[in-house]
Image (cartoon, grey):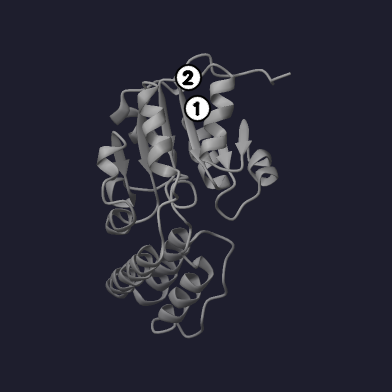
Amino acid sequence: MLPVTPLYRLSAMILDFDGTLAELTIDFTAMKRRLAALATAYLEDEPPEQEMPVLEWLDHLTCAIQAVEGRDLAVEFNTRARFLVMDMELAAARAGRLFPFARPSLDRLRTSGLRLAVITRNCAPAVRIVFPDIADHVDVVLTREDVTRPKPDPAHAGAALAALRARPGETLMVGDHPLDMAAGAGVGLISAGVATGRVSEDVLAEAGAWLTAPDLPALLDMLAARGLL
């Protein structure tokens, strides 16, 4: 028997990019190490790594430098650090690829009448390298440059909802990481997880995913079985 469906109508979907529609090739551990090494030019000692995502780590280091060296050097570090992050993102994008099922899955959703948005913590140039025709397959793309604070801050998913003119109760958030589940929950979205990144279905379920699947096509089949597509 199928579990109770919290959605009775599905009119829109917000999807993550890396790990959901495209291979996740970015080495975040190496990125954090390089940021810490850069920070040593401004701090006496290399800062100990914190359990936080890269962009939050960058902000943490910026604040630490401002506390010691003042605003001007903190701004200088932040600028250099963001170029470093973007350089690594672009290199990863050039080495990566879109999942073969991405375009057919998005087209299936649009044929079913859904409005689609992609939200990502990645930069816009990296997304365009991997998926140059993304605008032909989704209605809205919001990279980190398009918002003040990227997901899991709820404003990112909230901006996508507003751009889609969609209601939370009729919209599904789909991603490959607990951050995606948190981003959806922050604006009242039901979320679903796909295990095409670096996180298992069990971890996604523990993070609050209503449904989990090995990949996006399998998830769409599950939604269709529930009469949502």
**Picture coordinates of residue 126 (x, y %)?**
32, 59
Give the total of numbered labels.
Answer: 2
- Seen as rendered, the residue at the extreme top is 8
Q: Which residue is mark 2?
A: 169
Left or right, 119 with respect to 190, comes to left
Which is more foreground, mark 2 or mark 1? 2
**Which kind of residue does numbered mark 2 sit on?**
Gly
- Tell me if residue 215 comes above or below residue 114 in the rendering: below
Q: Which residue is mark 1?
A: 188
**Which kind of residue does numbered mark 1 sit on?**
Gly
Residue drawn at (66%, 49%) of the image: 200
Decide which of 37, 98 is in the foreground and name it.
Answer: 98
Decide which of 112, 10 is in the foreground and name it.
Answer: 112
Residue drawn at (40%, 22%) of the image: 112
> How many residues crowd mark 2 within 10 Å: few (<14), some (14–19), many (20+)?
some
Callout 2 secondary element? helix
Decide which of 209, 56 is in the foreground and name it.
Answer: 209
Query: Which tag, 2 or 1, sits closer to the chain's start?
Result: 2
Callout 1 secondary element? loop
Asked whether residue 209 is in view, the answer is no
User: What is the quadrant of the N terminus in the image?
Assistant: top right
**Picture coordinates of residue 154 (x, y %)?**
44, 38
Residue drawn at (41%, 62%) of the image: 96
- Seen as rendered, the residue at the extreme right is 1
2 and 1 marks in contact (CB < 8 Å): yes
Q: Quadrant of residue 215?
A: top right
- Tell me if residue 3 comes above or below residue 66 in the rendering: above
Left or right, 11 with respect to 174, comes to left
Task: Work out how far the residue at label 2 is from the one at label 1, CA to CA, in angstroms.
Answer: 8 Å
Q: Indicate which disc residue 56 carries.
A: none
Asked whether residue 18 is in view, the answer is yes
